[in-house]
Image (cartoon, rainbow, N blue to C red):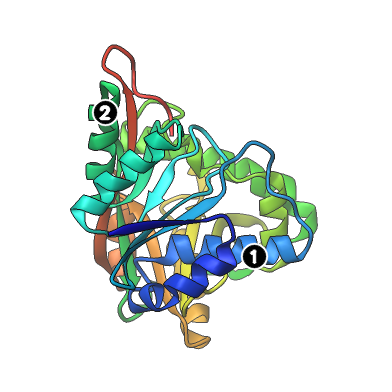
Amino acid sequence: MELRFFDEPREFLRVTSDFLARQPVVSTVVATMAERIIRERTAGISWPVGVPCWFVAVLQDGDVLGAAMRTAPFGAYPLFLLPMPEDAARDLAHALLERNEQVCAANGALPAVQLFCDEVAARGGGLAKVARHTRLFELDRLIEPPPVEGRLRPAQPDEEALVMRWYEAFIVDADEQGGRPAGTSAHEAQGAGVVRRNMQEGRILVWEDISGEPVSLVGASQPAYGVSRVGPVYTPSNDRRRGFASAAVAEVSRRILAQGVRACLFTDQANPTSNKIYQRLGYRAVVDMAEMVVSPNDAAPMRL
């Protein structure tokens, strides 16, 4: 097997397009990120200084058998791995160590991400641990939730501060609800520039109640290979258990389907409430994933 690295996402997509298209739901994170970087570079938006930005394809006899990327601008710059052969996951760990890249975290499909982190830990004398178990769902058939008064609309420019506060609160609540130490999910954070561009593109929406007050937030990614990813989903604590989040997710999912696009989303396996909500709307599990950290044996796991 060959590991072929790419600094240019356009060239990466040229090589891996058929592979990504065969499993567009599983590949959603890598595909949307590659296309987003292409759009931003075309628009003259620079990549953050010091943040890794590369993609890798696993090839054998010209066929693409897997892929990964390192583009996360947060924490320990975790990799994201798609499914790949076991030997390829281990070979990737060796390749990064030979490139003198420090690897302290990785996310992605199981078992590839587990094998990769175990190999990094074994080579470096460290310990690989799961920080969070996630699950990828795809909408099978939308099941309408009970009606809720209000409507879903794009977040407005003057609501940017509110949206950022809700993003930050979402991270805090995700750890609390999942029983994890505060800050474990810090990788969910989005920079103000990314949030602003998503708002400008109409990809961050709010559910407003009958009085016109925003009470819940939902996002949706730019479609890539015919798939759009729903999230984040957040409702402040004083407005929960009133059906706002279900109504918002159902409506944005309906709009995605109306475009002829498939809808998917990630859930935290430690939060049974959200998992049940999405399944009641018709989302069905596709694959289990994990967010992992690699740390020295005598140290606490590093944050993603």
Residue that protrudes farthest toward the top in the picture:
298
19 relative to 301, above or below: below
Q: Is residue 92 visible?
A: yes
Q: Secondary structure at mark 1?
A: helix
Q: List x then y, in percent, for residue 169.
A: 54, 39
Q: Secondary structure at mark 2?
A: helix
Q: Which mark is residue 151?
A: none
- In which quadrant of the rendered view does residue 49 lie? top right
For label 1, count other residues whose C-alpha is less than 10 Å away and answer few (under 14), some (14-19) or many (20+): some
Q: List x then y, in percent, for residue 91.
A: 28, 46
Quarter of the image for the C terminus: give it.
top left
- In which quadrant of the rendered view does residue 185 lie? top left
Residue positioned 53% across, 45% down in the render? 72
Q: Earlier in the sequence, mark 2 or mark 1?
A: 1
Residue positioned 70% across, 68% down in the render? 201
Q: Which residue is mark 2?
A: 123
Q: Is residue 199 left or right of residue 62?
A: right
Q: CA distance from mark 2 to mark 1?
A: 34 Å
Q: Which residue is mark 1?
A: 38
174 relative to 28, above or below: above
Query: Identity of the amino acid at label 1?
Result: Ile
Residue positioned 56% across, 63% down in the render? 9
Query: Identity of the amino acid at label 2?
Result: Arg
Q: List x then y, in percent, for residue 22.
A: 33, 78
64 relative to 3, above or below: below
Quarter of the image for the N terminus: give it.
bottom left
